[in-house]
Each structure stands twice: as structure tokens, then as C-alpha cells.
Image: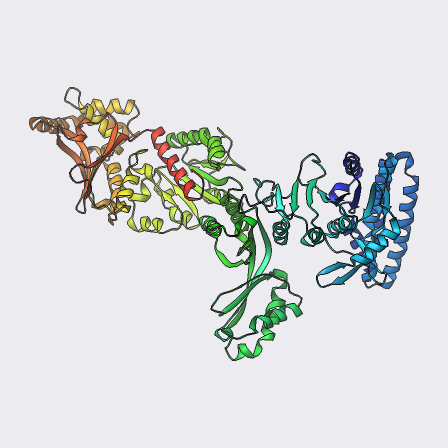
Amino acid sequence: MIGHKFGGSSVANAERISRVVDILLGRAERQVVVISAMQGVTDALINLVKLAAAKEGSWKDALLALEIKHLDTAQALLGGKADPVVEKLKAEFASLEDLLHAQSLIGAVSGDLLDLVSGLGEVWSSTIVDATLRARGASSRWLDAREVLVVDKSELGAMVQWETSQKKLSAHLGTPGDRTIVTGFVARTPDGRITTLGRNGSDYSGAIFAALFGATELHIWSDVDGVLSADPRLVPEAVLIEKLSYSEACELAYFGAKVIHPQTMAPAFERNIPIIARSTFNPTHPGTRISAEQDLSTPVKGVTTFTGLSILNIEGAGMIGVPGTAERAFQALKLSGVSVVMISQGSSEHSICCVIRETDAEAARKAVLDAFTRELHSKQLTDVTVTRGVAALAVVGDGMAGTPGVAARLFSALGRAGVNVRMIAQGSSERNISVAIDAADARRALRAVHAGFYLSPQTISVGVIGPGNVGQAFLRQLEAARERLLKVSNVDLRVRAVVGRKQMILGEPMVPPNAKPNVDTDLDAFAAHVHADHLPHAVIVDCSPSDAIAERYAGWLARGIHVITPNKNAGSGPFARYAAIKATRAHFRYESTVGAGLPVITTLRDLIDTGDEVLSVEGIFSGTLAYLFNKFDGSTPFSALVQQAKELGYTEPDPRDDLSGLDVARKLVILARENGWKMELSQVELESLVPEPLRGVSVADFLARLSELDGPMSAKLAAAKKEGRVLRYVAKLEAGKASVGLVALPTDHSFAHIKLTDNVVQFTTRRYRQNPLVVQGPGAGPDVTAAGVFADLLRVASALGAKL
């Protein structure tokens, strides 16, 4: 004997009922089948009673619509065999009309009438299912649960009188046949009054009749394939859970997960009847098996949230060591009909806080204030407060028990997502850790924790500013690696916005490759889109040279948006702004600001973090100037080399941006600050290669007068050659001083033999005093700069929990 229960969505119309019958006939087993009302019918029946009681004449039209719905369904399924069922349904609806007419005369809603009427949907739908089975030649018996199921009503809900119900069932049916169709949701009280089992009552009926019929399994059929690791509306990447224990399912259901109601599982749990949650729309899928068996292969099975809550906090030194305080508080809540969702008390006993439903907040506060009036007046208790807009988040799994690090992973995931925890609760079973958080953070928290336990990919929302050479190269590299990273490292990097100077494009779930900007640039809207509530992490990648964009970094970082950039303005601009940026809690990565893709900042950071002392830093930080002075041997005028470099794309559109040395000075300031020095750009001793008369002219005029550089540069080259030296444009940081300028170096110096456009940096430290540490390689170009930016993005992803 196998138990089946079909929910309202499974019997919503004729087509779906036909599918239910197909499922039942396709299984070779004896069956007890509990049927819910057609989708929406129970609510419609309750509304009918309320309309009639309110003397609203529209109840008659609503009743007629319900009657037509059921008659049409029966006709569609039974065709020429529909007459007996149609007659029965018409008689039922005529009786209901008489009852509702009486209700309209009485006025006030009758509880007994409400119970009787609200359970009629199951009577009608089960009648249609039973008739459809018999019309197809299958054996079937219809059982009205009101004739056999007896329940007591208590504070804990409907309590089955098992012995009485079993006797009534045996007397009514005798020996159960191959298939029995049962009305869900309805029952009788011991004194014979019709009643219902409450919300989710049809699931409860399924478990009750599975137990009464001695079923070996109970299949609960709905519109989902089984139990998911999170609500798929909030976490689209949620996965199906193959196995759950009864306890795990109860924990998930309590906090709002779409699982069978905990009360439903009680009869199955007591009799060790496995429950299989399955989909009517995908009947070959095995679904989720809920049983006494524990699967400890993963510590956490699911994550769920529950919104619409408040925190009630009772505080005061007078509670410390005083027995009965908590009892009085919770007794006051009980008498006010307030249900407590979570409880937490510190070992100091200075405060007790609990999570309650937001709709109960005022009643709860008033009840506790009334209960402790004397203590509040005497200042033994200092306050009773309510914090609204709260959500509960719970992680659930039998495997959490005795597994170190589960709580650490939970709080790390929340912390990385910028979610503050207001309250914590964990039972000694260690099966559930629950936290109270701001409701506004609930969706981000759920996705962060779900990914934190590797139940779904670590999703990062990425916004890109500056789709120029570097920005486009970064987007290409990311697109090429995205699928591999998702498959191998379980990290989902989604480019959701790209911003140019005048226009931008916002995408959901992401911007399609090669999509063109289509709306005017709005950096506030851009940041809001990237920092979406439904995604746990947000990163802005700024590939622009804009100081105005750098001005926004501190605000973005303070909101929890991580920032990655090759833009040197933030690292070398005003120190106060730099300090504000570095003081924020989010990640700020800027490896590509010095040396493009070379690990210059990482190397310096490693030296400092491991306790080394940096004595000096020297380097050639401009690929353009490296090229010029590698080529400048006197055989070609310096001006011609500048023109050549511009044609090759090595210089900025205005070569003075390179020749001024300001860009190199910015990089040196970034390194100085990384070394802990509070240096401003103005403190750098800077030698510009642009003659004073050429600094204020237009780009065209400057290019026309390039030859004015030749005389001074030729003189410096001749002086260097006379001493057997070569010219190099070098940045140096030593003893708190910074300088950038043209230097004549010995021909055996490491800077004298670099490749044409290489950057090179030399670290002299306490450890590397005799033989300095050198980092050398391509320090310019869109691809290598973009690679450095991409590497920073992966470092941030790793810090956020990605398995890289």
C-alpha cells in the first residue's frame, strides 16, 4: 500500500486531473489517495461565507462561478459518463446556496458553517477524480474523511484520535481495496461536528491516511520536483535535495521553506513512513526522499529565510540571577497570543530577546510592559524595545552536528556580503543555526550563505567603467574565462553594467557580449544596479583615467561594493581621500596601477606583511619612456623617436602625458603609501622632459615643435656617454624622499638592459640588501593591464569564498 496526496495545483483543472489519473494508473501498487481542493477553491469558499455574512449580494455570482468551474471540469473528463457526477455536484451546490442564504440572514460568521463550507472543495475534487478513474475502467472507492477521521482541537492544532478513527475506517470500508480516493482537509470532532485540519490540512490528511491504511510510503505531489536547497525565486541556482531526514525537513519548513508542513510529518515520523516530495508535472523525477535516515555527506542541506518579523528585547540588570524572569515574559506573550520564532539570551542574563511576527510587535511589547510595570518603575528593568524590519535566516543540516567551522563559514559569508547579524540562536542538536538580520538584507544574505556552503556558485555582480582599450580587453578576457571559472571554481562572474563617458548599458541577469550602450550615463543608477539586493557581492571595475570617478570610490566601498582599478588617481590623489578609501570594509584592489600586469604591489605587500624592512624602491615605471631611452643612442633625434612611439601606440594621444613624468610620479606615490608613508604627489621631486615653453600649447602645436626637445636631450646623452653611462628615466623612493627624473646609469646596471617597453622595479630591503629583488616585464598595453585587473577580480572572488 502506497499513500499519495495531490495538492491543489495538481488538480487545478481537467487537464491536470487527467495527468493525476495517468500517474495513478501507471503505478502497479495498492493506493490510498488524498485529494486537495482545486487550486484557489478553499479561499474562494471562505470568501463566500464572509460575503454572505456581510450581506454582499455578489456571493451568488461567486458561487455560480465555482459551480460552473466544477461542472465544466467533470464534463471535460467524463463526457457521456458525467451525468451522475454532475447531478451530485448540482445537489451539493444547491445545498451550499441554502446554507449561504441562511448565513446572509444571520449576519455574523458561524465557525461551524465556515468549517463545513471550507472543506467542500476536497469533496468535489475527490469525487471528480474517483469518477474519472472508474470511467477509465479502473477500480476505485471514494471515501469521505468526515465519516471516519475524528480529531480533537488543541493549541497545537488537530490531534487525531487514532484508535477511534481506525475502528471507524474498518467499519466503513471493511478490507481496503486496490485504490481508495479520500477527501483531504476535513474531519469530525468527537461530538460529531464537521471540522477541518487547518492550513496545510490536506498534506496532514495524506500522512494520517497513509498511517491508517498501513502504507509503506507517502508520495506528496505538487508543482515542484522536490525540496530545494533554497527558495528558487530568491536563489535561482538552488539545487534539489535528494534526501532529508524528518528533522531536517521540519527545520526547513518552520522557517518558510516550501517543504511539507511539520505537522504533516508527525504521523509519518511516528510510524517511520518515508515521504517522497514529487512533481505532478515531472512524474518520472525521483523527487526528495524524507525519512528517518540521515545523510551526513554535507554539513548543510538547505538555507531559508523568513521575513515579516521583529525583535523584542527586554533589558536590565535586575534580571541577573533572578529565577522566573523569562517565564513571566513568555507567559505574558502566551496570554497575548504571540508566537515566538527565536529566543536568545546572553550568559550575563542582562537581556532576553526574541523574534516575533511583526504583526504581533505592539501587542507583545504592551504585554511585556504590563507584566513588568513594577520592575520598570523601580529601574530593575531599563527598557522593553521592538526592532522592526527583521528577517530570520537559518542553515539546516544533520551533518552540522560535531562539524567544526560551520558557524564560522556562516558568519564569514554574511560578513563578506556586508550583512549585520542582530541575534543568534542555535539548539544543542546543532542541526540549525538561525540568525536575525535586517529584512532589507535578506535576499543578499540568503544568496551569500547558499554560495558560502557551495550549494550554488559564488555569484559576483560586476560593473565596468571605461570600455576603452583596457576595458574592452578586460571584458574579452572575462568572457573567455567565465564558463571555465563557473565549471571548475564554482564562481559566477556576471558583467551586469558597462559605463562609458556618455552612455551605459544595464543588463539582467547580465550584459550580452558585444551589446551597445543604450541609455545616458548615470553613475548612481549604475552603482545601484550593480549592487543589487538579490546578488550577494558587487564589484566595480574602473578602467577610466577619471579623477571624478575615483572621488566616488569611498562611497561605493562604504556600501559594500568592492572596487578594482588601474586608475592611479585614487592611490596618488589627496591623502585624505586615499585614507578614506583604505578605511572602508570592502576590498579595494589596484595592482594594475603600477606595472600593469606585473606583481609589483603584491610583491611589496608580501615583503611588508612578512616583516621585511623596505630600504629603497627604484624603477622604470613607464613603458613609453623605457622605449624612448632604450632607442635613444644619438643616431636618431629624440623628437623623431617620440613621433615613432606615438605612431606605434606607445604614447598617450598627447605625448606630454608621458614626457611630463607625472604618471610615473603617481605610481611612486602609490608605492610609497603602500610602504606606510603619508606622501602627497606634490612631495615628489619631479623632472619633466617637456620644456617650459611647450607645456601650455595645444597638442598640435606641441607636435609641430617637437624638435625643440632635441637640443637639451642630445646634450644630456653626450654627457652620459662621456662617463660611459646610459640615460634612463627612473623613479626612486628612499629615506622618505621620492624623486622621478632622468638618470645616467652605469652600463652594467640592471636597468640598462631591459627590453624595449619593459617596466622594472628593484626592491632593496633588509633581506634583499646585497642582491635586490627585481620584478621585470611588460608594463604597458591593454592586454597585460587587463590581465592585472582580471587577476585582482579573481583575488577578490577568492576572498569572498570562491574556490580558486
Q: Is residue 240 left or right of residue 152?
A: left
Where, by quadrant of the figure, is residue 572 drawn?
top left
Q: Residue at x 61, y 40 (%)?
A: 240
Q: Is residue 18 left or right of residue 513?
A: right
Tell me: residue 772, above or below residue 390. above
**The N terminus, quarter of image:** top right
Q: Residue at x 80, y 62 (%)?
A: 111
**In the foreground, 721 or 314:** 314
Q: Residue at x 31, y 38 (%)?
A: 593
Q: Residue furthest top?
A: 635
**Is residue 548 visible in the rendered structure shown here?**
no
Q: Residue furthest left?
A: 722
Total numbered labels placed on residues in the image: 0
Where, by quadrant of the figure, is residue 659 drawn?
top left
**Is residue 604 visible in the rendered structure shown here?**
yes
How was the colour assigned to the protein in this rendering?
Answer: rainbow
**In the foreground, 382 or 454:** 454
Q: Residue 714 location in percent, x, y? A: 13, 26
**In the foreground, 348 or 796:** 348
Q: Is residue 512 left or right of residue 645?
A: right
Q: Residue 450 location in percent, x, y? A: 53, 45
Q: Residue 173 location in percent, x, y? A: 87, 48
Q: Residue 656 location in percent, x, y? A: 25, 32
Q: Residue at x 31, y 44 (%)?
A: 571
**The C terminus, quarter of image:** top left
Q: Is residue 247 left or right of residue 754?
A: right
